Image (cartoon, rainbow, N blue to C red):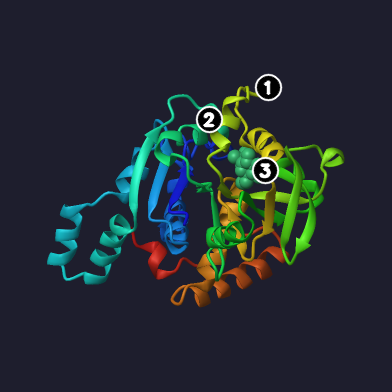
């Protein structure tokens, strides 16, 4: 039974500068929770109670978010804000979370390498901290179920438009049954004409501990980064590997457009703000169809005009 999850939260977040200069992208709010909380909640809902985060300089706020804050809890209690106090406490009770420091930003493969001591010899789940997946069966659970059937390592996939293949690790595979593929090859961020398919690695993996010895054989790429996908290619030579098309909606919070889309998506589903947000968006679209939106035409609502 897989119990351990690794969540790297160690990148620079360069696609989001200057916002990420002092705040990690994983702490950006998606509606009312930082993105990383959705990822931890997915791991916990999948049955993983032992989480290791790989952090680097400037990510202290991630640790603090999952720590207790007794003063804040006491304040909310005194004010009678029971629901908020419970929400705050819930975060620190979610799981056992340990932290390992990545001293130099040497890529995803290097971050995963640092989990070796914590993981030992068992298979583990790997969840990338800048991807939220909304689904009825938690995405990592979907991978764990396939791993229980086939053994070995399993990679979560989604199909992407061809013009986006160069943003992802891409898998060559043969369809076995349903959304399950036998992996034949993997390539990191190929050019469109070199991509073996449009099956993209979606930021969720279940890996056997053999990945660690594979990572030792990898040297840094042209950008000085150790790529996990290169180590997966070596792992593939040692044991069968499967890919599974994830059943759910993936939100990439690592770039501006997808981050905004994720906020709108979650906002539109919110019981209180969903309806007024929809009305606002429809008005905004109608207005922009007649020209550029003008700040003078947009009425501010009550909430946004208050400053707390
Ligand atoms: C990483 C992986 C890539 C994967 C992607 C998913 O890339 O290297 O294979 O497709 O995550 O988000 P990154 O986005 O960190 O550049």
Q: Is mark 1 on a helix, strand or loop?
A: loop
How far is the residue under mark 1 from the one under mark 3? 28 Å
Point 60% across, 31% down: residue: 214
68, 289: nearer the viewer: 68
Point out residue 62 in the picture as x, y percentages from the top left corner: 37, 44
Residue 147 position within the rendered picture, expressed as x and y whole percent measured from the top left: 59, 56
With 226 as the anchor, is 65 left or right in this view?
left
Residue 103, how many percent across, how many down?
A: 43, 25
> Taking the image as drawn, is residue 191 in sight?
yes
Mark 2 or mark 1: whose residue is earlier in sequence = 2
Furthest residue to the left? 78
Question: Of helix, strand and loop, which one carries label 2?
Answer: helix
Numbered label attached to residue 239: 3
- In the rendered image, which quarter is residue 249 located in? bottom right
- Find residue 186 and report its image quarter: top right
Provide the residue designation for mark 1. Answer: 222
Q: Quadrant of ligand 1?
A: top right
Please tell me the numbered disc located at residue 110: 2
**Quadrant location of the C terminus?**
bottom left
Q: Where 197 falls versus 108 (above or below)?
A: below
Nearer-the-camera pick, 186 or 2: 2
Q: Earlier in the sequence, mark 1 or mark 3?
A: 1
Give the mark, 2 or 3, whose residue is nearer the N terminus.
2
Q: Is mark 3 on a helix, strand or loop?
A: loop
Q: Are marks 2 and 1 in contact (CB under 8 Å)?
A: no
Label 2: few (<14), some (14–19) or many (≥20) C-alpha neighbours in 10 Å:
many
Image spot of residue 119 (x, y percent): 44, 41
* Residue 297 appears anywhere in the view: no
| Depth order, front residue of 178/57 | 178
**Which residue is pictured at 66% across the width and 67% down the height?**
285
């Amino acid at each position: 039974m897989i119990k351990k999850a690794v969540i790297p939260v160690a990148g620079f977040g360069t696609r989001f500068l200057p916002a990420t200069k002092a705040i990690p992208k994983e702490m950006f709010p998606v509606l009312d929770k930082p993105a990383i909380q959705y990822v931890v909640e997915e791991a916990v809902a999948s049955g993983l109670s032992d989480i290791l985060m790989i952090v680097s300089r400037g990510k202290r706020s991630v640790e603090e978010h999952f720590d207790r804050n007794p003063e804040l809890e006491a304040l909310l209690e005194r004010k009678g804000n029971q629901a908020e106090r419970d929400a705050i406490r819930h975060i620190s009770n979610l799981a056992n979370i340990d932290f390992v420091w990545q001293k130099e930003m040497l890529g995803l493969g290097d971050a995963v390498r640092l989990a070796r001591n914590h993981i030992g010899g068992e298979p583990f789940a790997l969840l990338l901290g800048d991807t939220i997946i909304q689904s009825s069966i938690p995405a990592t659970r979907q991978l764990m179920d396939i791993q229980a059937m086939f053994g070995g390592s399993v990679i979560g996939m989604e199909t992407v438009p061809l013009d986006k293949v160069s943003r992802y690790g891409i898998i060559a595979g043969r369809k076995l049954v349903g959304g399950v593929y036998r992996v034949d090859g993997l390539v990191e961020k190929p050019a469109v004409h070199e991509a073996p398919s449009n099956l993209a690695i979606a930021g969720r993996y279940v890996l056997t501990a053999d990945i660690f010895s594979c990572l030792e054989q990898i040297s840094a790429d042209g950008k000085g980064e150790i790529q996990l996908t290169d180590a997966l290619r070596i792992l593939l030579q040692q044991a069968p590997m499967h890919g599974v098309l994830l059943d759910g909606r993936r939100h990439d919070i690592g770039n501006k457009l997808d981050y905004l889309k994720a906020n709108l998506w979650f906002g539109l589903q919110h019981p209180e703000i969903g309806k007024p947000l929809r009305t606002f968006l429809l008005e905004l679209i109608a207005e922009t169809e007649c020209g550029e939106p003008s700040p003078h035409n947009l009425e501010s609502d009550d909430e946004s005009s208050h400053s707390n």
